[in-house]
Image (tube, grey):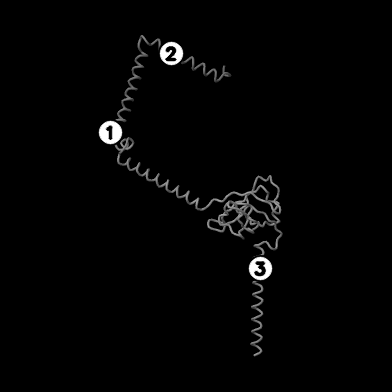
Amino acid sequence: MESRTENFKIRLGLFITGGFLLFLTALFYIGRQKHLFNTVINVHTKLKNVSGLQIGNNVRYAGINVGTVDNISITNDTSVRVDMIIDDDVKHFIKTDCIVLVGSDGIIGDRVVNIAQGEGKGEPIKQGSILSSNEPVETDAIMASFQVTVENAEIISGQLAAILFNLNQGNGALGKLLKDTSIATNLDETMENLRQSSKGLNENMNAAKNSFLLKGYFRKKDKEKAKEKEKKEIQQNPKSN
């Protein structure tokens, strides 16, 4: 009987000890998330739409968690105030000209507050500082824009398909050019006629050069060309002379 009582006391003691350790772990985790064990400062910003942001979401600077969202309140019909707790250790890195942006932790993750670096001309933030903000882009707006892009791509694809179909059928000037072999034949004949005409013209020019009446004229032209060529060579190589 006494051994059972002792075993019960031991199990009860282990249960209480385990529960107490679990409580301390949870308390430490929550306190760390709420920055209860660190020195912090409070800053805030104003937005027209917080886009699903909630109290307790992380605040990040340069991709590093530097605080949490402490409170979200509606100040008027066009403005929402977001209060943030920032670690005192990083306040000298964050300047008053930084911009607050509401984003997502990944594609479908929780909303986070991102503090973007400014021009670096502002003073370090302090207790009660007000930061400027840019409005977040709504997912619905992105999806609507994507839908318009898809519809436009569908229209363009349909038009291209119609053009290719008409070309394959030989419709239109380009289609006829691709399909009608007689056009290609006529083009070959035209090129051959041009070659023959060029050949005949060369023969006529050679005959004219050998003509008694025009021989002196062509000889004079050849001398002028030779003089021009010699003059250019002298200008290009003056040292050789």
For label 1, count other residues whose C-alpha is less than 10 Å away and answer few (under 14), some (14-19) or many (20+): few
Q: Earlier in the sequence, mark 2 or mark 3?
A: 3
User: Which amino acid does the dot numbered 1 rest on?
Assistant: Ser
In the image, residue 210 above or below residue 68:
above
User: What distance separates the C-alpha of mark 1 from that of mark 2?
Assistant: 45 Å
Find disc 3 in the rendering and name its residue: 27
**Numbered disc in front, either 1 or 2:** 1
Instruction: Give residue 53's position: percent from left, percent from top.
Output: 58, 57
C-beta proximity under 8 Å, tags 1 and 2 = no
Mark 1 secondary-structure assignment: helix
For label 3, count other residues whose C-alpha is less than 10 Å away and answer few (under 14), some (14-19) or many (20+): few
User: What distance separates the C-alpha of mark 2 from that of mark 3?
Assistant: 107 Å
In the image, residue 45 above or below residue 34:
above
User: Which amino acid does the dot numbered 3 rest on?
Assistant: Leu
Instruction: Give residue 97's position: percent from left, percent from top.
Output: 66, 47
Instruction: Give residue 91's position: percent from left, percent from top.
Output: 70, 53
User: Which amino acid does the dot numbered 2 rest on?
Assistant: Lys
**Would residue 163 be found to the left or right of residue 130 on screen?**
left
C-beta proximity under 8 Å, tags 2 and 3 = no
| Quadrant of the snapshot with the N terminus | bottom right
C-beta proximity under 8 Å, tags 1 and 3 = no
Find disc 1 in the rendering and name its residue: 182
Pick whichever, 87 or 240, lies toward us: 87
Q: Earlier in the sequence, mark 1 or mark 3?
A: 3
